[in-house]
Image: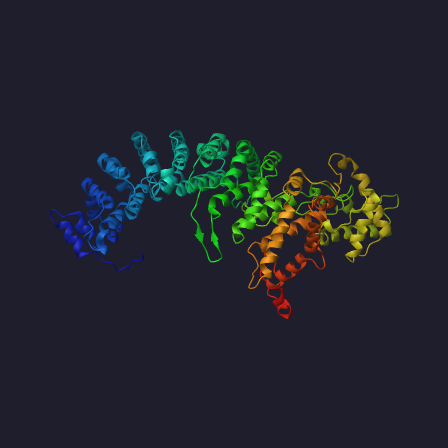
């Protein structure tokens, strides 16, 4: 609030200061009382520094006012009293902490039975928070002494965390712990606070709340609180400086984060989620915490490139170790999660405009689908094997068809199958396409994203796992540049007369060609390169063909000689690396074989397609809600078949009848298939904008010229 420079002291307050037996309430009724205290008038401050006045201010802040008072006046005294207590005057905080009776009165508010009045709880939280928040003009050693005194007082009570857990239905109360962890300054003091909270069993107490069915109204708040603890701990690990006495958390200095990410805590969470007759709130909250633990860590803004690289490497290593722990703990429980997906907690029927859901799909099953999606994305063989031992994919496709209007479910189904078919590819992105031409993965800093739809992880471009080798990104061809030594005048074909001017001119032209390649052809997709023999001659012909298609003037004989020389010179390096090209016709993975052969997933997808076709064909029929995602699933299958012919052969060999085979070809035909028509219609409706990619919307009116669009709808 901005005050007039010509402000004059209140005459009423001056009169009250001279009055005998004046009450605190009389001062609080004055409109200018807060401004008068901010001006730090000595006589007024001396009055409010009296222990009895401070005690009365605390009482007014925490006492429920009489209900017979008008609404506009009920909480006036409590509000003004709280403002006076939190003005930021260090001497006021000292007086409050020095008076044991007043401090006990403040602490006693936590002993009230829930639920607390939300407004009074906010006043208490604000007053309590000012005791451990450093003021700008406060002496550092005095602040440390006050915080230490408050911490020692809380330790002596022996029930601080129990009282906090009792009031989790009022989020402002447990937020006090988060504020203490965030605002307390000083390495040793912060370390002491963290150690005490962990020793008092903060995490164990919160998990016990999730296990209690009668505490279901607290479950969501407990889950959010645990996720905040994880996020705060990981952020602290990145932002703490090396010279801080509170060492970075990855060395074990943050015992709370270490406890949450430990195997015993994960096991306790899974026991809560999978306990018999578990409440849906407990299941959903527990899985939410697990997903937060698995989620990749995002690096905060860091301009120092050396420190950024250090953080990236460190966080990647930490997350790899964490995933090993999670996978080791969760693997034996996957069959129980699958059973919970089939038999979730009972829910009453819900009537919506499209149909009656009996039973509704529910948040429990949605969270389980998200958990399986995240686990599949780890590409861990043990997890894939454990999932294959369940009927997860059959259940998933059954639910996909049954709940045809639940796009949250459809999105998770698409992600799961995209991971299966996308990771099914030949993994050629880890190898060179030939002995002479190298491949490189473009990382997220160059705006090359992994084609995994809406990733369950955060798709922030600062994500450390989208940097460097991204296992699921489309590889691009990068042709080798000329060595630095050759840029000084040496040609690619070294001979005795290399110093002659014509030869140097040819060498310079060859260098320009190479530079043009790096700038113009660095985004040439591998799937556009022909799959020829892996001989050096085949690679050279392919290389030349790409250049000629790019309208680059090139001397073919000179270029062939250049490639031969580079191949000879790099043979030593190539022997140290895996430069073997993986055949595009490499066989399908075990997970793909399970999905195609055992789960008959293609047949189930075609059944969904046929079901939609039947619904659309009736009078006033409409397209079912899962069709957009089903189209994308078929596109993933097509991409997989184009990369690995054995996938197509495996699909063809597992049709149960000729009718299925005919339906498959009628859908997948490149020219007249239903999928081609659906993609064309979808593109027209979206104005040629790809709805599955993050891009600016580009308005085009080409779809208005199509007169047959109404028939397609």
Which residue is at a point 35% across and 37% down the rendered structure image?
165
The quarter of the picture where residue 591 lies is top right
Where does residue 275 sit, x and y in percent of width and height? 45, 34
Against 514, residue 711 (above or below) is below
Q: Quadrant of the N terminus?
A: bottom left
Left or right: 666 with respect to 532? left
- Work out which quarter of the rendered image holds the C terminus and state it: bottom right
Q: Is residue 113 visible?
A: yes
As drawn, is 563 to the left or to the right of 337? right
Provide residue 118's location: percent of width, then percent of height. Answer: 30, 47
Between residue 132 and residue 702, name the one nearer to us: 702
Q: Give the colouring mode of the picture.
A: rainbow
Front in this rendered view, residue 249 or 289: 289
Foreground residue among 334 and 264: 334
- 129 sits to left or right of 532: left
The tally of labels here is: 0
Q: Is residue 704 above or below residue 484?
A: below
Q: In the displayed orientation, state which residue is furthest to the left.
A: 20
Q: Position of residue 398 (x, y in %)?
A: 56, 46
Res. 448 visible in picture: no
Residue 42 lies, in percent from the top left, at: 21, 47
Left or right of 513: which side holds 138? left
- Looking at the image, which residue is at 74% across and 34% down? 576
């Amino acid at each position: 609030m901005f005050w007039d420079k010509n402000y004059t002291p209140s005459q009423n307050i001056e009169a009250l200061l001279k009055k005998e037996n004046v009450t605190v309430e009389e001062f609080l009724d004055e409109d200018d009382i807060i401004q008068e205290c901010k001006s730090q008038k000595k006589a007024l401050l001396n009055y409010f520094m009296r222990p009895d006045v401070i005690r009365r201010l605390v009482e007014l802040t925490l006492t429920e006012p009489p209900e017979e008072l008008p609404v506009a006046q009920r909480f006036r005294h409590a509000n003004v009293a709280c403002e006076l207590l939190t003005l930021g005057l260090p001497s006021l905080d000292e007086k409050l902490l020095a008076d044991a009776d007043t401090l006990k009165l403040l602490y006693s508010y936590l002993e009230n039975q829930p639920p607390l009045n939300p407004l009074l709880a906010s006043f208490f939280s604000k007053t309590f928070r000012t005791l451990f928040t450093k003021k700008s003009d406060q002496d550092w050693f005095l602040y440390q002494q006050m915080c230490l005194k408050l911490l020692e007082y809380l330790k002596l009570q022996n029930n601080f965390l129990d009282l906090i857990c009792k009031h989790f239905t009022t989020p402002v109360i447990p937020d006090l712990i988060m504020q203490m962890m965030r605002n307390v300054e000083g390495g040793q003091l912060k370390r002491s606070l963290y150690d005490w909270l962990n020793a008092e069993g903060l995490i164990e107490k919160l998990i016990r709340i999730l296990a209690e069915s009668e505490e279901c109204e607290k479950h969501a708040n407990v889950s959010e609180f645990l996720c905040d603890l994880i996020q705060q701990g990981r952020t602290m690990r990145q932002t703490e400086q090396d010279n801080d006495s509170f060492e970075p958390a990855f060395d074990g200095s943050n015992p709370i984060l270490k406890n949450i990410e430990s195997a015993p805590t994960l096991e306790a969470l899974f026991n809560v989620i999978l306990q018999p007759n578990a409440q849906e709130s407990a299941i959903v909250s527990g899985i939410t915490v697990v997903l937060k633990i698995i989620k990749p860590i995002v690096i905060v803004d860091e301009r120092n490139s050396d420190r950024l690289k250090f953080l990236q490497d460190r966080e990647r290593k930490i997350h790899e170790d964490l995933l090993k722990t999670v996978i080791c703990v969760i693997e034996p429980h996957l069959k129980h999660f699958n059973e919970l997906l089939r038999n979730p907690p009972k829910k009453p029927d819900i009537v919506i405009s499209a149909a009656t859901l009996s039973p509704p799909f529910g948040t429990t099953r949605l969270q389980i689908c998200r958990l399986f999606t995240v686990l599949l994305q780890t590409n861990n063989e043990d997890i894939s094997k454990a999932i294959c031992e369940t009927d997860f994919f059959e259940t998933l496709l059954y639910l996909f068809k049954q709940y045809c209007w639940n796009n949250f479910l459809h999105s998770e189904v698409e992600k799961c199958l995209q991971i299966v078919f996308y990771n099914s590819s030949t993994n050629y992105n880890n190898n060179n396409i030939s002995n002479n031409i190298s491949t490189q993965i473009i990382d997220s800093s160059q705006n090359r994203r992994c084609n995994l739809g809406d990733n369950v992880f955060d798709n922030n471009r600062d994500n450390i796992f989208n940097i460097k080798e991204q296992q699921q990104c489309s590889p691009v061809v990068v042709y080798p540049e000329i060595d630095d030594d050759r840029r000084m005048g040496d040609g690619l074909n070294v001979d005795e007369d290399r110093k002659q001017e014509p030869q140097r001119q040819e060498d310079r032209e060859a260098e320009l060609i190479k530079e043009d390649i790096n700038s113009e052809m660095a985004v040439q997709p591998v799937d556009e390169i022909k799959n020829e023999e892996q001989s050096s001659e085949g690679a050279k012909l392919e290389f030349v063909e790409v250049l000629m298609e790019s309208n680059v003037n090139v001397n073919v004989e000179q270029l062939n000689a250049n490639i031969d020389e580079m191949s000879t010179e790099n043979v030593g390096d190539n022997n140290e690396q895996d430069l073997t090209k993986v055949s595009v016709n490499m066989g399908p993975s075990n997970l793909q074989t399970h999905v195609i052969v055992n789960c008959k997933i293609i047949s189930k997808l075609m059944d969904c397609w046929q079901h939609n076709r039947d619904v659309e064909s009736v009078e006033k029929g409409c397209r079912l809600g899962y069709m957009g995602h089903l189209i994308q699933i078929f596109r993933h299958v097509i991409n997989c078949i184009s990369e690995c012919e054995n996938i197509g052969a495996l699909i063809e060999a597992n049709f149960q009848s000729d009718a299925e085979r005919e339906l498959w070809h009628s859908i997948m035909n490149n020219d007249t298939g239903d999928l081609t028509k659906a993609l064309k219609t979808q593109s027209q409706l979206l104005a040629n904008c790809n709805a599955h990619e993050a891009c600016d919307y580009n308005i085009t009116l080409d779809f208005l010229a199509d007169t047959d669009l109404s028939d397609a709808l």
